[in-house]
Amino acid sequence: MAKRDPVAFMSYLRRVDQHDHGRLTELRKRLEGEIQLHTGEENFAIFQDREDIRWGQQWLSRIEKSVDHVTFLIPIITPGFFNSNPCRNEIDLFLERERKLGRSDLVLPIYYIDYPDFNDEECRRRDPLMAKIAKHQYEDWRDLRHEPLTSAAVSRMLSKLAITFRDALNDRRPTPPPKSGVAPTIADRKRGQRPDQAEDPENADTQFQEEVGAAVGQTATPKPGPPTLVVNQLHRGDHTTIGAAIKAARPGTVIMVEPGLYHEGLVIDKPLEIIGQGAIDDVVIEVANKNTISSALLWAVLLI
């Protein structure tokens, strides 16, 4: 059977595109081209309009029959998205397809307009479909929605998204842990894998250090690391702002900042390590008419 070109379907509310004067349509075109550049797939297509005859033809063949080629869904998350039966049905079909294929990287959401229910863990528990989407890797476009599509910030995000598609096309998934009954080697554990049959998984790191110490004729004493706080704007960490994390942190704490645009000035009055996750441009701190960072005593501010 001849290999079919990979495609994607954008699932969204048409009124959002109309209200934003065709911005989602332009975003789709830019993303389509960026993916082609990063993957070398010259015929990669993103289908957008459900009324387009090509959508119907491709949708049925790809979702009901396809197992030999990659097909993606790009849900555009907005407050009305989960109230739309067509949008919910599309996600249901793709999630089932992911399950059958043993994948978890074929649904790539874009969080486009802030939706409080999507941010609230209790609301997600009441809507299993919303909870499943929240667990997928998604990109936060809420601040980028009002940026020119030719801006540097949007271009970087498009490039990041295209790389995600590229890796999914190449099926670069994490290596699974050792199968049950197969004892991992010391080298396996040094790569972060845990013993499958440890009686107390919480003590796996201690067990590992003891085994390493025994291997070299020494007794290893586990050394506790510094306390850590995670900053995530979608309530997936300890705090939603960097300032709140700084206020709550004890001296020596490591503050991990997830990607996002943070509108806040920072006063650092204790020794801390602040680490931005992702590329150097993924964490942006902006504040008008004020110093972005004021530090009485700064241990280190790192972006990695």
Image (cartoon, rainbow, N blue to C red):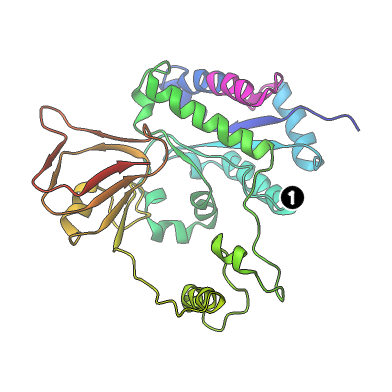
Against 158, is 247 above or below? below
Label 1 crowd bin: few (<14), some (14–19), many (20+), radius 10 Å = few
Which residue is more in the foreground, 17 or 249? Answer: 249
Q: Is residue 35 magenta?
A: yes
The magenta-colored residue range is: 30-52
Q: Secondary structure at mark 1?
A: helix
Which quadrant would the C terminus be assigned to in this image?
Answer: top left
Q: Which residue is mark 1?
A: 101
Against 124, is 138 above or below? above
The answer, for residue 48, to whether it is visible in the render is: no
The x, y position of residue 234, in whole percent, is 36, 48
Which residue is more in the foreground, 74 or 215? Answer: 215
Q: Is residue 227 magenta?
A: no
Q: At 33% from the left edge and 65% from the top edge, which residue is drawn?
A: 225
Which residue is more in the foreground, 243 or 4? Answer: 243
The answer, for residue 76, to whether it is visible in the render is: yes
Q: Is residue 127 found left or right of 233 in the rendered image?
A: right
Against 31, is 163 above or below? below
The x, y position of residue 172, in whole percent, is 65, 44
Q: At 41% from the left edge and 33% from the top edge, which residue is drawn?
A: 141
- The kind of residue on which mark 1 rests is Leu
Q: Is residue 2 found left or right of 174 in the rendered image?
A: right
The x, y position of residue 18, in whole percent, is 46, 21
Residue, far front: 217
Residue, far bottom: 199
Q: At 22% from the left edge and 59% from the top edge, which residue is drawn?
A: 252
The x, y position of residue 21, in whole percent, is 43, 17
